[in-house]
Amino acid sequence: MDNGILIRTKDLVKVYPLGQQSITALADVNLTFRRGEFAGLVGPSGSGKTTLLNILGSLDAPTRGSAEVLGEKVETLSHRKAAALRNRHIGFIFQTFNLLPVYTVYENVEFPLLLLGMPPAERRRAVADALSWVGLADRTKSKPSQLSGGQCQRVAIARAVVKKPELVLADEPTANLDAENSHHILDTMETLNRDMGTTFLFATHDEKVIRHVRRKITLIDGRVAKDEALAGS
Amino acid sequence: MIAFLFKGIFRDRSRSFIPFLTVTLGVFLTVGMYSYIKGGVFTITRFSANLGTGHVKVTTRAYAQETGAPANDAALTDAAALASRLADDYPDFDWAPRIRFGGLLDVPDENGKTITQGAVAGFAADLLSSESREKERLDLGRGLIRGRLPERPDEILIGDILARRLGLEPGQKAALLSSTRRGSMAAANFTLAGTVDFGVRSMDRTGIVADLQGVRAALDMEDEAGEILGFFKNSLFDRNKAEAVKAAFNGRAGADASDDFAPVLLTLRDQNGLGESLDYMNAAQAVIIVVFVIPMALVLWNAGLIGNLRRYGEIGIRLAMGETKGHIYRSLLAESLMIGFLGTVAGTVLGLALAYYLQAHGINIRVLMKNASIMIPNVLHARVTTLSYVIGLAPGLLATFVGTAISGRGIYKRQTARLLKELET
């Protein structure tokens, strides 16, 4: 995509069938995100935040309209191509961390690189870098059960950014964390955004997150109600 | 990736323990039962061959058709010349003339009056010539209970159970009452050299073994034999070679298909329904594998379903990270094959341990054979073959593969559109 544009949606509509009726989760959403943005999608429950993340993460396809992510039209992607787009270019961070419990911190972070087929030496370097970015270089051998919630989320961030994706989608990343941990997590993501130029897009209710983002898009009933640039932290 | 999967299998016991145990148990039983049936087939084949059928047998058509009492009136004549020709034409075989006979064994007192009598049935083999391998083949030395092996043509061995029933001791004389080849009554005195545990219930009760020379004299069968048995020199029955010899012998120039007294050659499989029995037992080996594969696959399918439910979150995150459904499905199959392989190795080791034990000690089926008249040895041993080492691979790997292949299909029904919602919980 030209001019540093990473994501562009055009008249994006998502309708879910519900028995005889249907629910419009997104209605005519037109948004553009440039590389390096640190943006938040806010709005009440059911406003379409997660649906939009789903589509931008190539996990779901729009009913109508277009969502172009990294030059790929999501609505035309096959399952395999959508997986390849996520695998190479998109990192995910979830509210509940979703680390693989039987694997160590190191192995959790290494996993996306295994999927990419990265050579071992390169992989070791990348995992070490990612863990040092999130301040967990000394916990490589720990299991998720031995970590605090904040540490688990930092591992999840390392896992999301270890392959140096252009885009990180975070769904309520601080919802399960206390204020201090939330602050650390957001600081970490901001640093990564600044140093690596990774685009972060959050879906959140959390005021703490909103205070950190530089752009806030408010969704109400599936429509973009407000799209505003913020000063950020 | 393989190392990654291995770590998961070893660390997450609930993922691997039940499938591992299932495969181990199934493979253990498969290897053990396969080896035991194999041993059963081998033992029955060897016993039948040594005691009555040979690997091949030359006799007259009339003699072969008589399934009850031995029809010595249809015995082969010029037996020595025929045996010599057979040795020349078919040198892969060791040829051994035998005479089957039956009658009454009469035990007299010192005045010659009958004390007791018992029905006997048995055979005469060349137990005395230096070139004969019959003594070794019949393994009479090992089964000897009392007395010794015959050293003269007029000495006999009988089953120990029969001897005790008749009150006959080694060294005592007894008269064999039978009929000659020409139908006259035959009465000949023999000395009991020893008593034997034939290892076959029916023979222990009525069996008699005598030297060929003595029985020929007693039954007026000089240079005659009821049958000439052929044994492969390596003692192992080779069906293809036996069939080839049969075709060559029975199709030889001058063979007269209408002559009941012309010699014909039968293989072991042609006699006493042995062919069908052996086919049945061989089929049973294949059935065992199938029988174990099906329940194992069902258990593993179920274990796979439970495992996939437990790993619902893990599979979801992997899909979100960009792993394709096909790749996840294949990785589950790879995991199951690893578990299957480990279970197969463990099951094979345990199964072989059982098989080697049963090969050495066997299982005594004497109680089961109490009233049986067929020649099945009292102790059936397992037989460990090369196939015993690998036979477990089929049920072990196939069952895990099939079980996981079915249970893992649920991955294809997973909707990526719901992943973020699912992974929130």
Image (cartoon, grey):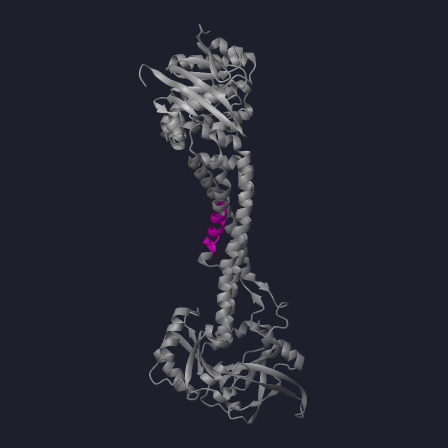
Is B366 located above or below residue B328 in the figure? below
Q: Please give the name of the residue rendered at 34% of the width and 81% of the height, measured from the top-left corner.
A: B252
Q: Residue B307: which quarter of the image?
A: top right
- Relative height, residue A15 to residue B98 (above, below): above
Picture layout, residue B196 above or below residue B360:
below
* Depth check, front residue: B315 or B117: B315
Q: Position of residue A66 (x, y in %)?
A: 39, 22
Q: Is residue B27 magenta?
A: no
> Which part of the image, by quadrant, shows the N terminus of chain B?
top left
Res A87 → quadrant: top left
**Whether residue B197 can be seen here:** yes
Residue A112 on image: x %, y %: 42, 28
- In the image, farthest residue toward the left: A2
Q: Residue reaching furthest front?
A: A20
Residue B350, visible in the rendered structure: no
Q: In x, y percent, where is residue B9?
A: 50, 37
Q: Nearer the viewer, residue B181 or B302?
A: B302
Q: Residue at x 42, y 69 (%)?
A: B239
Q: Nearer the viewer, residue B122 or A173?
A: A173
Where does the image place residue A73, in percent across and percent down from the top left? 36, 25
> What secondary structure do most residues of the magenta stretch adopt?
helix
On-image quarter of the C terminus of chain B: top right
Outermost residue, top side: A231
Residue B394 part of the magenta-drawn span: yes
* Magenta span of residues: B388-400
Name the one closer to the observer, A167 or B10: A167
